[in-house]
Each structure stands twice: as structure tokens, then as C-alpha cells.
Image: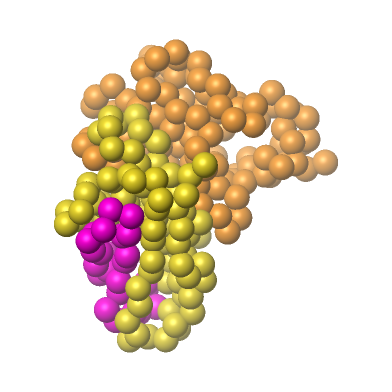
Amino acid sequence: EADIYQTPRYLVIGTGKKITLECSQTMGHDKMYWYQQDPGMELHLIHYSYGVNSTEKGDLSSESTVSRIRTEHFPLTLESARPSHTSQYLCASSATSGRRGDEQFFGPGTRLTVL
Amino acid sequence: AQSVTQLGSHVSVSEGALVLLRCNYSSSVPPYLFWYVQYPNQGLQLLLKYTSAATLVKGINGFEAEFKKSETSFHLTKPSAHMSDAAEYFCAVSSGGYNKLIFGAGTRLAVHP
């Protein structure tokens, strides 16, 4: 069973606050991803990492930043939250084989609301 | 470049009826295709995937999908809908290196008695 965790599940916060969304996986996967999903819309890749100390920006531009100093941990940070950041953020990971057919395992998501 | 189009943002079926969710893809390389399901307030769960083996792929919960290269399609079907199938369904294609996925806009399936 996939074990990938995200906290908090729900976050309501005021404009200008700094926030960090946590994502951890216990599967030893090298590859990890962050997606942004607006209600009723597709997922857009905003960050990914293929190992410790490597991070890349995804297809959708985002003001958030990520870090990867441990294999199992891939936190996302917003230095100054704005209402336009209101969305659902999904974290995922995949195995280390490098094949394009590898499944991505998803966490339950964090629903962020910025007032 | 890869892309995915899901025809029909909402599909409604009766319990026991056939489920058909449509997905067309565009890919400059042999595609790897996925169907994921998302229940309310949850993450995505893999239903099935096509990775150039058999063109008819069987997944969990009685779903299956057929890869048709000539039609660039990968439609998802289930012979008999159950109330528990009500969810959002996403088709995705694997893009380039690092196993990145490109998702379609999703289809919300409603099942009524």
C-alpha cells in the first residue's frame, strides 16, 4: 500500500503569511512531485524532484518554492500567501526505475484557502 | 509535446448501466497512458495503465481501457456502474523524462439509482 502523507489537510490563512505544506513518503522513492488543482480542473505540475538536493520547476509557474534535503520529505513553501494561491495542492512520488510507465502515488492533498 | 483531452466534463449513468469515459491523447513518442480516480477530498488512485504491452488493460474495481493507436484514444469502460463509482476520473499521459504526467481536465461521473 502506498504511504504518502500530507499535512495539514486543510489550511485557512490570512494574506501575507508564510506557510509550509508538508509531504512525506515511506516508500523510498527518488522522484517526488507537487501538483496544483483548482476545483473541477486538471492537475498542473508545479515542482518536481528526482532526488536529494535536486528540484525543478514544473509546467505551471508558481510562486512557491520546494526543498529536498531528505529522500522522504518534500515540503512546499509560500513566503507570502495571497488569495490567488487558494487551491488544492497534491504531492506524489514514483519509483526509481526511471521508466515512463512508473505509477505515481498520490497523497490526500492540502486544501489551502487564503483570505 | 504530449496532451490529453477528456470529452465530457460530466457523465451521468444509471446504476447497472455501461460506463464510458472518453480520453484522446497526443504524443510525439509512444505513449504511456494512465487512468486515475479521485474521490471527494482525497488524492488520486491509479485505476489502470498502458505501457505498450496488451492493448486491452484491466484495472481495479472492474474498469478496463483499450488503447487504440489509430484513433489516439484510451477510453475507460465498466460494464455495470455501481453507486460507489461516483467520482472524478482523470486520464494522463507520461511526458518526457522524470516520469512527469500530463493530465486531462477530468470527467465527473454521477451514478443514480
Q: Nearer the viewer, residue B100 or A41?
A: B100
> Looking at the rendering, which quadrant does residue A90 occupy?
bottom left
Q: Nearer the viewer, residue A86 or A108?
A: A108
> Looking at the rendering, which quadrant does residue B64 occupy?
top right
**Residue A106 image position (x, y, % from top left):** 45, 49
**Residue A92 seen in this snapshot:** yes
Give the magenta-colored segment's residue range. Answer: A61-85
Q: Residue farthest to the right?
A: B113
Task: Say if B83 sits above or below B67 in the image.
Answer: below
B68 relative to B18 in the view: left or right: left
B10 relative to B73 in the view: left or right: right
- Residue appearing at x 33%, y 86% in the figure: A16
Check if residue A71 falls in the magenta segment.
Answer: yes
- Prevailing secondary structure of the magenta residues: loop
Image colour for chain B is orange
Q: Nearer the viewer, residue B7 or A3?
A: A3
Quarter of the picture holding the C terminus of chain A = bottom left
> Looking at the rendering, which quadrant does residue B99 occupy?
top left
